[in-house]
Amino acid sequence: MTQDNRISGGQIDRSRPLRFTFDGIPYTGHAGDTLASALLANGVKLMGRSFKYHRPRGVISAGSEEPNALVELRSGARQEPNTRATVVELFDGLQARSQNAWPSLKFDALAINDRLNTFFTAGFYYKTFMWPAAFWEKVYEPIIRRAAGLGSLSKQDDPDEYDKGFLHCDLLIIGAGPAGLAAALTAGRSGARVIVADEDFRMGGRLNAETFELGGASGADWAARTVAELASMPNVRLLPRTTVIGAFDHGIYGAVERVSDHIAVPAAGKPRQILWRIYTRRAILAAGAIERPIAFENNDRPGIMLAGALRAYANRWGVAVGKRVAVFTNNDDGLRTASDLRAKGISVEVIDSRTGAEVIDSVGRLGVKSITVRDAQGTRTIAVDAVGVSGGWNPNLSISSHHRGRPVWDDAIAAFLPAPDGPAGLTSAGAAAGQMSTHAALTHGAAQAAAALSDLGFTAPAADLPPAEDAPVSIKPLWFVHSGKGRAWIDQQNDVTVKDVKLAHQENFRSVEHLKRYTTLGMATDQGKTGNVIGLAVMAELTGQSIPQTGTTIYRPPYTPVAMGVLAGRSSGKDFRPTRLTPSHKWASEQGAVFVEVGMWLRGQWFPRAGETTWRQSVDREVLQTRKSAGICDVTTLGKIDIQGTDAGAFLDRVYANTFSTLGVGKVRYGLMLREDGMVMDDGTTARMGQNEYVMTTTTANAVPVFRHLEYCRQVLWPDLDVQLISTTEAWAQYSVAGPNARKLLQKLVDQDISDAAFPYMACGEITVCGGLRARLFRISFSGELAYEIAVPTRYGDAMIRELVAAGQEFDAVVYGTEALGVMRVEKGHVAGNELNGQSTALNMGLGKMVSKKKDAIGVVLSQREGLVAEGGYRLVGVKPVDPAKPLTAGSHFVATGKPATAENDGGWLTSVVYSPHLGHSIALGYLKNGDTRRGEKLRAVNLLAGTEVDIEIVSPHFIDPEGERLRG
Amino acid sequence: MRYSGFRVIREALTGHKGWTPAWRNPEPQPAYDYIIVGGGGHGLATAYYLAKEYKQARIALLEKGWIGGGNVGRNTTIIRSNYLLDGNEPFYEFSLKLWEGLEQDFNYNAMVSQRGILNLFHTDAQRDAYTRRGNAMIMHGADAQLLTKEDVRALYPFLNFDNARFPIKGGLAQKRGGTVRHDAVAWGYARGADMRGVDIIQNCEVTGFRTENGKVLGVETSRGYIGAKKVGVAVAGSSSRVMDKVHMRLPMESHVLQAFVSEGLKPVIDGVMTFGAGHFYVSQSDKGGLVFGGDIDGYNSYAQRGNLPVVEDVCEGGMALMPMVGRARLLRMWGGIMDMSMDGSPIIDRTGIDGLYFNGGWCYGGFKATPASGFCFAHLLATDTPHKTATAYRFDRFAKGLMIDEKGQGAQPNLH
Amino acid sequence: MIINHPLLGPRDSQEFVYLGDAALMNRPDGMAEGALAAFIDFAYLRDNPAGLHRELWYHEQGDRSWLVVTRNTVTHEITTVELARDVARKAGRSK
């Protein structure tokens, strides 16, 4: 197809034709085109369908405020729904499809909704679809859901990458139109660090779309020259194709740079987009103004657009949208469109409402064919193929209200101005601040920059700005045409008409917020950038109030919709969160270990051997062999905190429920740490390595919170205690060696004597291994076996696991993973994550006696509240199935035999379940009401989710070696 | 006026001239039997049930701005009763049952849609915890199902099953959970209350409470003094500010929670889903927007707006869970102020002042509670005894050690 | 947000972990008469002001300082940032 509507001029590169398709039909455009300008050049006006009535729609704007021309861009996994054709930079091979239309854009079956519009008024759905009750979900809602929505997701993984970055500047300038460029020049020459961000791919803003001159040059040329000068300044960073999406606290702005959206596929290694977090000392909003339409009957037909957009397509893109054009305006700027178009040889008829003329209707289903004009002479029909409408310009103040500051009304321009109490450090300049002429925008931009810079201590040289047009705003507000019974659109995407606002008023949805929510005005993807003020004006007229009395809605971030991918950056897939690897990871990988996510860590879950086909085979072997001979396990992930100082013992007495100051040097003790509310926060062992030196271990999950808590206690609660902390979790590789042969195995590596006499149960000390490597040894046991934990500096962790395994060969030692670890700790009756659930006290865990009331430790007082010590509370129990063949399930609830499984009979639950290869059946720990008095009782473990129940017996939680003979061996 | 399909057709054919205001704009009377302070969802529901179930006369609801502008006007629309603890589950199940009959009850289509909720799990410990929870739910008369990874894949094949940092292992589903058109809840209750004689008074800010000898006499407002025999405060988000007027310190902090909606999309997510390895939950509205959220920002705030770190964190969760959303666009973000209580559970209780009652501390779970909260608060106001499903929501539970701490995080509100 | 750390200068609040009202430094004496009531008040009740709020932040991804930040909960403006240890000492906390 040829570009029939292409006229001369504009900032497109005619030497670079670009091919693209829309709904499968091939077209050509030029470099510098947007999808919208290229389609218009090819005579395509119909670009989409509206949300509710499926009305045929064309483009109405030339910018990001576009409500109508939304397309699905690209294909396959890169399909991108709801993309505004007005901001899509044309590239060769671009594919776009219309959306929300079936079977085709021209013949959309759901356009029947438009015929039935009288039923589909604002909020009609709140009043019906209620009978019969079941029909909402089964019948009505599925139909509505299928009809709703706009474009579609591909349901495939987004193949592109996204990045995030951080930028710092003295002054951020949002928008590179005349005000922004003048501000940037001023700031750039002052030496301040400046960032200029503009959503367009070509900086210059309206200067690119106008014909007037700046000091003898065209606006576009002046903009290009200025941009070039700015680009040469080392202290200025230009960010075209970059939308500032929001103002956040303390001068932080979010911005999205579309790095690769203007090409078919991102270059290798390049992201599709970048989210910049820009830290600013000052910012200037120079985002220009957005034109608004005037509502009249059938004002939504393709070809009816904003007058300024019509002009922009002609001036910037060399596109005559129509050959017979009408301009309907209430202000002088509309006249500028008429004169610019006429200068390009287009016939234009002006309907200026200030003279009493109004457009009252239009005809042309798929593209406007004629309009009806009413003026002093009466009513007449004018044949047209495009209409430009100008209801005045709204300062583009969106970002200034992101901190919920309320815009203020200005009668002179009949529009809202940015809130005076906007984000701290943000000022507005140019049209965004209501300075509408080019001259005003330039001088205001420079002045606002100078003011901001002077606050920061920079001296801004006087700007040498070119002379420019300085036409005053001349407007006589007209919001909507009072006429007839038809519909006049306010929010084109959501199909909100003047009638809907009237109905909202009639039904007392008069507050601006009620209006918005009841009619959905301004809730579409354009956030009502063109329509909101008209809706307000209609409501104001109905209530007899002024527009500012009626209210205003504020805008919320983001300024324009943002791809979720860029907000996630690189944190997706396997990189969603960092991965921490233990020192034995490389070795474990070589063994074919199965790994499991434990917080950020990957730990060996089990270590399969040849011939093992199920995980249970591996785990059972690891457990049995550990208990029979020896097992080795990487326990590096446990938190390790060195605690030193003359008050270290006293400090530990306060942070643990039990006492540590009395612990002998060279000894280890199990410690129970409470939250201040009396619940158990964490447990672990703490070793006294010297008089004023302790080493604390925490659970893997709580390593960070416990350290934070200890720092709080040290710095905030008891600031004068002589105690120092350092987290050494990453500094030591730590391995547990457990089992009857643990000592023999270790003695092969440890340089000192570790016989029971020299290194008894719960001993600890600094030792050396392998002939001199410094290490720490702790004789502690989680498994219930004779066991040690040995720590070496992390860089020796890989060597150590290999030494341990080699030393263990003669004992047939195994390396065991987290599953076997879990089995052995349940067999031994130790609490762990499932019992340390933050809802349990020491008493619940059967550890009540550890809570010393003789000293003031965190959590002791509140642990004694009546509800926490009352009879009938949960107590830790052991559980075994009456029939050993029956497996237990964690999360099953205790129910008395013969009682129904209801809440009244809920006795508690099974916290942890493992299969004990030693005992040959499932065993569990559980919290049972009054559990400490119920040993030997038979109950049911009910799992209603699976429809199963198992008869169980309550036993001691210590399934193996209850007297602790093994670990003392 | 009764709403119905016939009415809609009749009005459509006669130019919609017959629709009347959904509620009146009455002038405040000098005194009422009951004053409800706060025209959010809970306050409106309280007024409605007080008028309907407890047949109380002379009820006023005072709202400082526009009704429905509380958190009922800014939330992620989810209803469910998948709670763990005895103090909570009967209440939320009662609420879900009220949701199930709500539209016919108040003659307003709030689009209660039981599309199901699915809480994904990614570790064995999470599976165990969800098993415990699912069983507790069923024992309380609610519905629950434990889904395997393959069950989840059948429901949502586009989730990240094969390249995940924290692979999906299954999920806890409640089919009766779902979503509701949130604004319509406020309007339905308002209309229903108004029809039963409740004076809904907007733009009427309570500036103080008049008390005598430890008993409430009425409220000072921006529109003058209004007497009342009993006053119920339901002003979540402003609870501490309002109760400070009677010098009550509350067991809560105010925090900002952000929520998000994408551009409209053709149906892709049928129910509600929560990610178990990060802060992200999502559903799709009937209009097509993905409605999603995550964690609170984490610092005390009354600002009704949040910051980028949480926005990014939430979208990271979204991308980790369903990488197709990279090309969906976030359309709007907003912030609401949450009464974050000390154990994550609410309070519906009397206060130290006779005739003054309090409802708050809903954290970010208040929307689903709206019907039961209103019902139980009305019950308390009318009978001076707690409703049987809300007996645990007392101020003194902290002193007694009877916290209702679903997450086990203790007395730190920003962790609930 | 940006927290102007008294030792390190301005830092993004993302480096910090928030705890709550700085009154959490006024931990009662657990051995004193009436400790239970004092602890219930300390642990569970908050002023929760709309306006200036002194609050505890921890520089977890930094120097591990606990800070007392004075911040307006309505505007989020931060007016002062102090080392919590200094504040605690001034308030009479010691060992």
Image (cartoon, helix red, strand yellow):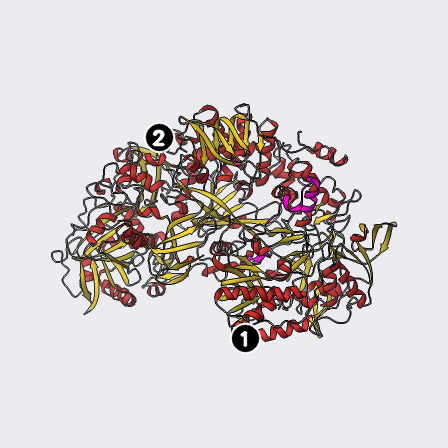
Q: Quadrant of residue B413?
A: top left
- Which of the labelled discs sits on residue B349, or is there none? none
- Choose between B43 and A956: the one closer to the eye: B43
Chain under callout 1: A
- In primary-sequence order, the first of circles 2 and 1 is 1
Judge the density around disc 1: few (<14), some (14-19), many (≥20) Cα neighbours within 10 Å. some
Can you say whether B236 is above or below B104 in the image? Answer: below
Q: Quadrant of residue A482?
A: top right
Quarter containing the N terminus of chain A: bottom right
Residue type beneath disc 2? Thr
- Is A687 one of the magenta-colored residues? no
Q: In the image, is B345 to the left or to the right of A516?
A: left
Magenta-drawn segment = A535-564
The verdict on a common chain for dots 2 and 1 is yes
The residue under label 1 is A233
Across and down, in percent, residue A180 comes to 60, 66
Across and down, in percent, residue A609 comes to 34, 59
Query: Which tag is nearer the camera, tag 2 or tag 1?
Result: 1
Across and down, in percent, residue B302 comes to 47, 46
Across and down, in percent, residue A605 comes to 35, 56
The residue under label 2 is A897
Chain under callout 2: A
